[in-house]
Image (tube, rainbow, N blue to C red):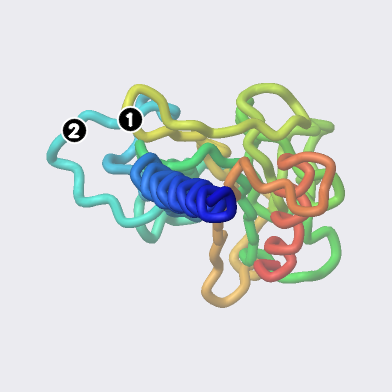
């Protein structure tokens, strides 16, 4: 009889354990939870400005609704097509770079290629030049100064960086208040030297202005983003020379 009772007790215990295990599994499944996050990445964007810069305030968006549609980042609001070169005069030419309202903050560079005067003796003294405006600085060793009366702010060609008025320090161009942002003019006029004459001029004379815009978050292998931007701009400028 005792043996039988023992078997019954073990049987009851076994049934209880099975019931508990079954209940535990069911409870665990009922209280379980999962979570998933899908994060979409973007490479950022540098959009074209929605409007042209204001001709009178070149670091601000224009307000003239009759302006033609914008198609680029580089503007010259005062350039007149086929402007004539006359010795000892100025020609209106005002390169200005802009980015759209939704653009990433960026570093901006401009390269100027001057193909107007033939190579030869004292060619630099006969080459048209411009005076750099306050928002810009030359990139050392990548800009050619004009041969004038000691004015160190006059150049004929080369690479220049946007500094927002702090000489020698790259500045970030950033849209604000839902509006496009502009660097302001690299220069406002090109001066034609008195020493230049028609025999000094090459066939199809031209001054080519190109801009390079580099996202400000990109450090690359450099110490900071500004250093990386400058290195990339120099490489780009070599392809423009």
Q: Earlier in the sequence, mark 1 or mark 2?
A: 2
Spatial CA distance of label 1 from label 2 is: 15 Å
Residue at the image position 34 percent from the left and 44 percent from the top: 30
Q: Residue 84 versus residue 103: which sits nearer the camera?
A: 103
Q: Position of residue 46 (x, y in %)?
A: 45, 49
In the image, taking residue 67 as reference, residue 54 lies left or right, namely right
Residue at image coords 63%, 36%: 162
Q: Residue at x 41, y 55 (%)?
A: 83
Closer to viewer: mark 1 or mark 2: 1
**Could you tell me if the residues under marks 1 and 2 are in contact, i.e. CB atoms within 8 Å?**
no
Quick check: can you spot residue 25?
no
Q: Which quarter of the picture shows residue 118?
A: bottom right
Task: Place residue 111 in its image quadrant.
Answer: bottom right
Q: Residues within 10 Å of mark 1 (few under 14, many from 20)?
A: some
SS for callout 2: loop
Q: Residues within 10 Å of mark 2 (few under 14, many from 20)?
A: few
Q: Which residue is mark 2?
A: 64
Q: Position of residue 181 (x, y in %)?
A: 42, 33
Q: Decide which of 14, 34 is in the foreground and name it.
A: 14
Residue 44 lies left or right of residue 127; in this view the side is: left
Q: Is residue 81 visible?
A: yes
Position of 234 relative to 97 (above/below) = below
On screen, residue 232 above or below 138:
below
Left or right: 113 with respect to 138? Answer: left
Disc 1 on helix, strand or loop? loop
Q: Residue visible at 49% across and 44% down?
A: 95
The quarter of the image holding the C terminus is: bottom right
Residue found farthest to the front: 1
Query: Which disc, if any, is residue 179?
Result: 1
């Amino acid at each position: 009889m005792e043996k039988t009772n023992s078997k019954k007790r073990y049987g009851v215990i076994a049934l209880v354990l099975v019931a508990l295990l079954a209940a535990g599994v069911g409870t665990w499944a009922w209280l379980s939870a999962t979570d998933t996050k899908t994060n979409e990445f973007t490479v950022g964007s540098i959009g074209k400005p929605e409007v042209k810069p204001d001709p009178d305030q070149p670091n601000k968006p224009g307000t003239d609704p009759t302006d033609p549609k914008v198609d680029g980042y580089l503007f010259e609001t005062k350039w007149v097509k086929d402007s004539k070169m006359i010795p000892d005069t100025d020609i209106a030419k005002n390169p200005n770079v802009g980015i759209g309202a939704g653009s990433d903050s960026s570093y901006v560079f401009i390269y100027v290629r001057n193909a107007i005067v033939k190579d030869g003796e004292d060619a630099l003294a006969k080459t048209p030049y411009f005076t750099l405006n306050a928002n810009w600085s030359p990139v050392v060793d990548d800009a050619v100064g004009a041969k004038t009366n000691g004015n160190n702010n006059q150049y004929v060609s080369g690479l220049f960086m946007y500094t927002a008025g702090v000489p020698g320090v790259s500045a970030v161009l950033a849209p604000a208040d839902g509006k496009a942002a502009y660097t302001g003019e690299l220069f406002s006029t090109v001066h034609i030297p008195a020493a230049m004459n028609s025999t000094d001029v090459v066939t199809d004379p031209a001054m080519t202005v190109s801009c390079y815009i580099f996202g400000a978050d990109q450090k690359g292998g450099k110490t900071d983003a500004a250093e990386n931007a400058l290195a990339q701009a120099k490489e780009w400028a070599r392809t423009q020379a």
